[in-house]
């Protein structure tokens, strides 16, 4: 546990350095291509930006469907709930300084807060990531093929042919490990490295996740539909690029948009550890745009139009996330306060085997032992009747009669 705490500042520092490097690359590109030229290009695409913002609800719906489909049958949350959780997760992945995987972890947390089992939530996100990476690899390979066909640069075939099998093999390996029980293995490693009972509990959770993963993958209908929607989402995302090309007055068709989107997404995924892919995404658009004959300032303008869309959807998503987390923190605080007001278990609770929040009437004899207990209110008549039947009380009553004292 202490080792993990020591590594946290190092991980945070690494993320900040990567973000700083991305920001530096972004600044260099902007200055090199001319701030004024890029700004004028974006301004000229005013209607295109608005159209992209409206159209983006379509790929968001497809992305939501892909996640919803890989929840275990019978445990799928309402589609509208998955929609806003996906929106918040993507917002964090695009804007927060927590690298791409940060949004996926938040998706798990949000699903659990919405009363999904943690095993179902974790499984759905892991399977969703696996299928997303697989389909994106295929989409990027299609984009590279179109790039080679459009530019005649056959020297690009080598990296494309060499890279695609490696990427697909990596996804296949991850899938195989999931089917073999990788999460139980991780839980076992964690439980051996830490004596903390909270971490030790992950051993059992890992086994549950493995079982749920196998159950989800065995639902072939849902998996095939998820893959179809994933591929559709990548191509629909390219429509946004096509809209931006038309708005900027750049000649070309939908195949160019697929090339730009496919290669840019491939570069972004390869550099997932850079928060928000800042600078990486812009550089990818500039380089690929030049190969397609698109001026560098226009390629950078395309990337920035995408950033505008990410900001327009992402900033409200981050605000919504903070509201949810603040509300959850408030609930936890009030629950702790209420628990403190009720009190904690004391010696009397332990002596008579009662719980703090349970109602109990305990009749205690003179010897200090519990004679009878009731879980509901008892009338005084019943209570005195029970007391009068007790041996010590009877002796007391006999003595009082002999002495002439009132009972």
Image: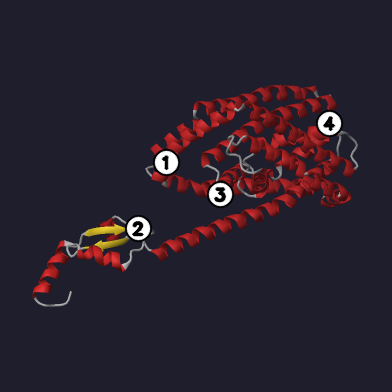
Q: Upstream in the sequence, badge 3 or badge 4?
A: 3
Q: Closer to the N terminus: mark 1 or mark 3? A: 3
Give the image location of residue 299, x and y in percent: 82, 41
Q: Residue at x 36, y 63 (%)?
A: 377
Of 384 and 355, nearer the camera is 384
**Mark 1–mark 3 distance (CA, rounded to whole Å):** 19 Å
- In the rendered image, the quadrant that contains the C terminus is bottom left
The quarter holding residue 165 reads top right
- Do labels 2 and 1 touch, CB within 8 Å? no
Residue count near mark 4 (Cα–Cα under 10 Å), binned few <14, some 14–19, many ≥20: some
Above or below, 393 against 144 in this view is below
Q: Residues within 10 Å of mark 3 (few under 14, many from 20)?
A: some
Q: Nearer the viewer, residue 358 or 332?
A: 358
- Disc 4 on helix, strand or loop? helix
Depth order, front residue of 297/265: 265
In percent of width and height, residue 380 lies at: 30, 68
Q: Residues within 10 Å of mark 1 (few under 14, many from 20)?
A: some
Corner quadrant of residue 148: top right
The residue tagged 3 is 113
Q: Nearer the viewer, residue 44 or 211?
A: 211
Quadrant of residue 75 within the rendered picture: top right
The answer for how far apart the CA atoms under marks 3 and 2 are is 33 Å
Q: Are marks 3 and 2 in contact (CB under 8 Å)?
A: no
As measured in the structure, the alpha-carbon distance from the residue carrying label 3 to the one carrying label 4 is 42 Å
Disc 1 to disc 4, C-alpha distance: 51 Å
Badge number at residue 375: 2
Tag on residue 201? Answer: 1
Residue wearing tag 4: 255
Mark positioned earlier in the residue sequence (2 or 4): 4
């Amino acid at each position: 546990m202490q080792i993990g705490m020591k590594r946290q500042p190092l991980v945070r520092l690494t993320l900040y350095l990567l973000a700083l490097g991305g920001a530096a690359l972004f600044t260099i590109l902007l200055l090199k291509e001319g701030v004024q030229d890029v700004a004028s290009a974006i301004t000229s695409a005013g209607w295109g930006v608005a159209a992209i913002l409206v159209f983006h609800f379509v790929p968001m719906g497809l992305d939501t469907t892909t996640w919803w489909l890989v929840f275990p049958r019978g445990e799928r949350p309402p589609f509208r709930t998955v929609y806003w959780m996906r929106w918040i997760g993507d917002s964090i992945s695009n804007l927060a300084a927590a690298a791409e995987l940060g949004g996926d972890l938040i998706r798990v947390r949000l699903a659990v807060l919405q009363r999904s089992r943690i095993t179902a939530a974790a499984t759905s996100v892991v399977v969703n990531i696996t299928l997303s990476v697989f389909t994106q690899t295929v989409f990027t390979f299609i984009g590279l093929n179109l790039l080679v066909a459009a530019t005649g640069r056959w020297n690009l075939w080598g990296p494309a042919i060499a890279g695609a099998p490696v990427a697909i093999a990596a996804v296949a390996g991850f899938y195989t490990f999931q089917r073999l029980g990788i999460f139980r293995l991780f839980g076992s490693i964690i439980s051996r490295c830490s004596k903390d009972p909270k971490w030790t509990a992950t051993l059992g959770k890992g086994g549950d996740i493995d079982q749920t993963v196998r159950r989800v993958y065995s639902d072939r209908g849902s998996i095939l539909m998820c893959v179809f929607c994933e591929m559709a989402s990548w191509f629909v995302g390219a429509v946004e690029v096509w809209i931006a090309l038309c708005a900027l007055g750049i000649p070309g068709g939908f195949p160019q948009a697929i090339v730009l989107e496919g290669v840019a997404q491939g570069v972004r995924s390869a550099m997932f550890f850079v928060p928000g892919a800042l600078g990486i995404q812009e550089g990818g658009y500039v380089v690929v745009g030049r190969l397609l004959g698109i001026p560098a300032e226009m390629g950078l303008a395309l990337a920035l139009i995408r950033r505008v869309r990410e900001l327009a959807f992402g900033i409200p998503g981050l605000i919504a996330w903070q509201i949810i987390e603040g509300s959850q923190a408030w609930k936890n605080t009030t629950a702790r306060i209420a628990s403190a007001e009720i009190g904690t278990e004391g010696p009397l609770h332990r002596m008579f085997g009662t719980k703090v929040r349970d109602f109990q009437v305990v009749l205690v004899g003179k010897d200090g032992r519990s004679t009878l207990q009731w879980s509901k209110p008892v009338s005084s008549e019943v209570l005195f009747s029970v007391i009068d039947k007790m041996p010590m009380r009877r002796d007391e009553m006999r003595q009082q009669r002999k002495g002439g004292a009132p009972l």
